Amino acid sequence: MPSSESEVREEIALLAAIAGGGREAFRELYGRYSAPLFSLALRFVGDTGTAEEVLQDACLKIWRHAGSYDPAKSRPFTWAVTILRRTAIDQLRRQQRTPPALPIPADDFAPAEFASGENTRRATETHETAARVRSVLATLASPQRDALELALFSTLTHAEIAARLAQPLGSVKTWIRRGLSDLRQTLSLPPP
Amino acid sequence: MNESLEELAVLYVLDQLTPPERTAVEARLTDEPALAALVRDYESALAAGIGSLPPLQPSASVLGRIESGIDELESAGNLRRAQVGRSKPASLPSPVPRPLWVDWARWGIAAVITVSLAILAFQSLRNPRIQPVYVMVGLDANRTTFAELPSPEAKDPDTRFIQLASTAENLWRNPSARPLPAAPASGDNRGYALFDPASQQGFIAIEQLPALPGSQQYHLWVVDGKSGRIRDAGVLPLAGLNRGLYSFALDPAGTPAPDHVRPNFFITVEDTSTTQPRGKVVLGKESI
């Protein structure tokens, strides 16, 4: 997960190397992205086997399309998430399944266990950022929090989120925007 | 802060825009630093939100499977390049004196090619190439109406689906843009299907259907326009709602009819899961 501009630059360079056929660069990027993308894929589709298929397909698309990545349009991680999300939508469509229901169970917000080999600094930063995100989510009332979680962790469109929560589309869009805005502002402050 | 700009940045980062809207935002990113900065900030928020999930690791075999897939892609690419290489004409001059019959043979071949081209041109005038189309089918309790829309030439099913989804969403949002006769009075069951014969994918739009008790479900069926065979397109996940836009894909094992043969759609109420329509038809007609 990129947490600094230098890491973003590294990942842009990795994608450029992948576009040139660099297997080592691909393995490096996979090492960085596989856990967050797999965690997200599991949210999207609801079972481990399908989540691994989605991750596999998305990674092959990253390999094939790395040459068309444009850093002016998005960061590498956002680009990868977009590919993953569209792959999950396609997979659910093929299986004629609806996206699994949320919200996320409370025990998912337990302190994260970091993969061995990840350096301590990055792990600590990620842990602090995750705690701040959870603190923002904890301040939101139920429908706002559900709307934001569905926007972040499901393949639903905003209209589908509104239908699932039985809330007006305008309200849902506002909650999602404000929730993300709160996250953005919290992350822009120095750590406590 | 400009709220509409924020809204746009959020929708862009969460991939909630249609392809034309997305392209328009991407064009603005280079000229509008404020929008670009907002997008960067929301990208950080998205990454942090995803980072708050427990970082679960996929099984170790996934990387191996991905690398095998890459190997296959690369060997397929090498094969294509090799075939292209073989098809290049040799440019070396022949040192062997050319016999007289070769000239006669060349004239003969040229004559055959000319006649063949003339026949092809004549046939193409008689049978103009059929432009790929989307089929749109209006459905209500008493009638079925048809219309066609031009569809893109893309071959890749993923690309076709994205383009179809964009069209379906636009038509859903703009009823006046639908090339179908006006829907009946509100309160009646009504909807429409948008189908891409080339990829066997489609969207079913339900504008009005009564909510069902939990034990029943709406089931979508497609009638093959050529053979009349009924194909199962799945259960509509209406779940207490009486309207919505849903995608479906037909079993690829089925034999697709040519573009110009119209399929038909109908919806039944079923008590249990079924592979054949048994319940009451509530939208469209079973026969063509």
Image (cartoon, coloured by chain):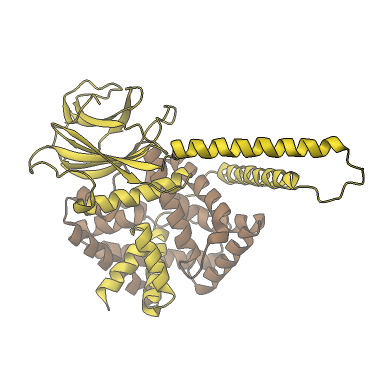
Chain colours: A brown, B yellow
Q: Residue at x 20, y 49 (%)?
A: A163
Between residue B277 and residue A172, name the one nearer to us: B277
Q: Residue at x 49, y 42 (%)?
A: A53
Residue B266 seen: yes
The quadrant of the image that shows the C terminus of chain B is: top left
Q: Residue at x 23, y 52 (%)?
A: B177
Q: Position of residue A191 (x, y in %)?
A: 40, 75
Q: Identify whether B269 is placed above or below A53.
A: above
Q: Position of residue B35 (x, y in %)?
A: 36, 75
Residue A155 seen: no
**Total residue callouts:** 0
Q: Position of residue B140 (x, y in %)?
A: 15, 35
Q: Position of residue B42 (x, y in %)?
A: 37, 68
Relative to residue B38, is residue A51 drawn left or right?
right
Relative to residue B191, is residue A118 drawn left or right?
right
The quadrant of the image that shows the N terminus of chain B is: bottom left
Q: Residue at x 46, y 50 (%)?
A: A38
Relative to residue B194, is residue B77 drawn left or right?
right
Q: Identify whether A28 is placed above or below B187.
A: below
Relative to residue B267, is residue A55 drawn left or right?
right
